Image (cartoon, rainbow, N blue to C red):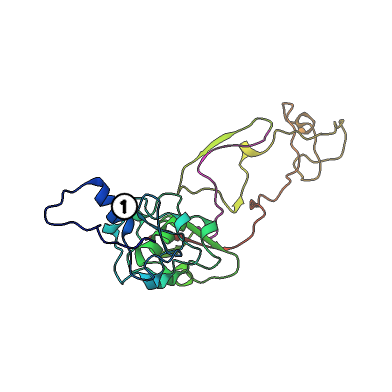
């Protein structure tokens, strides 16, 4: 680099000219090591420049760089080395949602097991919990009967839909020859475990009867045969068969698998 030589400084009566100013700039020297070619370099236009990786922690005083000293977009991912930012270098509450652009944090930028409950602020953890299980959510477990408030560590949960299956709210249409559409309202209940058929629910049917002739030795109404009413001194043409069936209820349950269910109420 150039050395300042005699004649490059101004006398009290000298005029300031561009030539003399350029001479001083071109002849300027720096403290030994200030411009070492590794971290700083002298540009062609006379300006100092910082080379890639020229600024290290050892060359920056504590608190020398604050947010007020950085212009917007001055720090980009291309200017930060991998592993340069660690949790011990970030002040509490230094990173907030307003300081992070949408889509700035992706799974590719988070190490496996990098996010734990201990590393999340209370409000952030509550946000995650509410996103996963908002009030009104249903939690199911096939083998563990523990209340989710204990199991998950948050919320108020109560046992839900004991002895009942869940059906999606809205309209459903079955696949019968004559399809039926039913509207199911949220939180409504219905159905039964057992059912006794009513007369209207019994399929239309008939019974075959054998025609008897006069002289057949059967007493009408004896419980073991039939005979024309006219043959026993009555009138009309009605016949009667023996009773059949027990009139008991029948099982109305679909195939099922029992699990523990809870709903979050708060």
Task: Please give the name of the residue rendered at 46% of the width and 47% of the height, measured from the top-left corner.
Answer: 188
Q: Provide residue 112's location: percent of width, then percent of height.
A: 56, 66
Q: Which residue is mark 1?
A: 71
Quadrant for the N terminus in the image: bottom left
Q: Could you tell me if residue 153 is visible in this image? A: no
Horizontal arrangement in the rendering, residue 251 relative to residue 242 (left or right): left
Q: Provide residue 111's location: percent of width, then percent of height.
A: 54, 65
Horizontal arrangement in the rendering, residue 101 relative to residue 176 (left or right): left
Horizontal arrangement in the rendering, residue 191 relative to residue 137 (left or right): right
**Which residue ends up furthest to the front in the rendered image?**
6
Question: Badge 1: how crowded within 10 Å, few (<14), some, or many (20+)?
Answer: few
Q: Provide residue 64's location: percent of width, then percent of height.
A: 29, 67
Q: Could you tell me if residue 46 is visible in this image? A: yes
Q: Provide residue 213's location: percent of width, then percent of height.
A: 87, 30
Magenta stretch in the rendered image: 161-176
Is 134 within the magenta?
Answer: no
Task: Please give the name of the residue rendered at 75% of the width and 43% of the height, measured from the top-left corner.
Answer: 242
Report the front residue among 150 and 240. 150
Report the front residue among 30 and 236. 30
Secondary structure that dominates the magenta span: loop
Mark 1 residue element: loop
Report the front residue among 21 and 174. 21
Report which quarter residue 91 is drawn in: bottom left
Report the front residue among 86 and 80. 80
């Amino acid at each position: 680099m150039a050395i300042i030589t005699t004649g490059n400084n101004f006398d009290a009566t000298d005029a300031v000219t561009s030539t003399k100013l350029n001479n001083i700039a071109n002849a300027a020297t720096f403290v030994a090591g200030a411009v070492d070619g590794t971290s700083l370099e002298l540009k062609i236009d006379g300006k100092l420049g910082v080379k890639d990786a020229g600024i290290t922690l050892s060359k920056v005083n504590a608190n020398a760089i604050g947010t007020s000293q950085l212009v917007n977009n001055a720090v980009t991912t291309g200017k930060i080395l991998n592993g340069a930012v660690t949790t011990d270098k970030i002040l509490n509450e230094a990173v907030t949602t307003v300081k992070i652009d949408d889509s700035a944090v992706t799974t590719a930028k988070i190490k496996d097991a990098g996010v734990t409950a201990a590393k999340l602020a209370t409000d952030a953890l509550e946000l995650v919990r509410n996103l996963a299980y908002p009030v009104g959510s249903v939690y199911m477990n096939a083998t563990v009967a523990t209340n989710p408030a204990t199991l998950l560590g948050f919320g108020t949960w109560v046992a839900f839909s004991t002895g009942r299956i869940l059906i999606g709210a809205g309209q459903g249409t079955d696949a019968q020859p004559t399809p039926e559409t039913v509207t199911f309202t949220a939180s409504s209940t219905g159905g039964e475990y057992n059912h006794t058929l009513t007369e209207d629910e019994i399929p239309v049917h008939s019974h075959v009867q054998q025609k008897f002739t006069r002289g057949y030795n059967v007493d009408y109404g004896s419980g073991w045969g039939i005979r024309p009413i006219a043959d026993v001194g009555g009138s009309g043409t009605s016949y009667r068969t023996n009773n059949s069936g027990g009139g008991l209820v029948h099982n109305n349950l679909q195939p099922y698998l029992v699990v523990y269910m809870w709903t979050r109420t708060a």
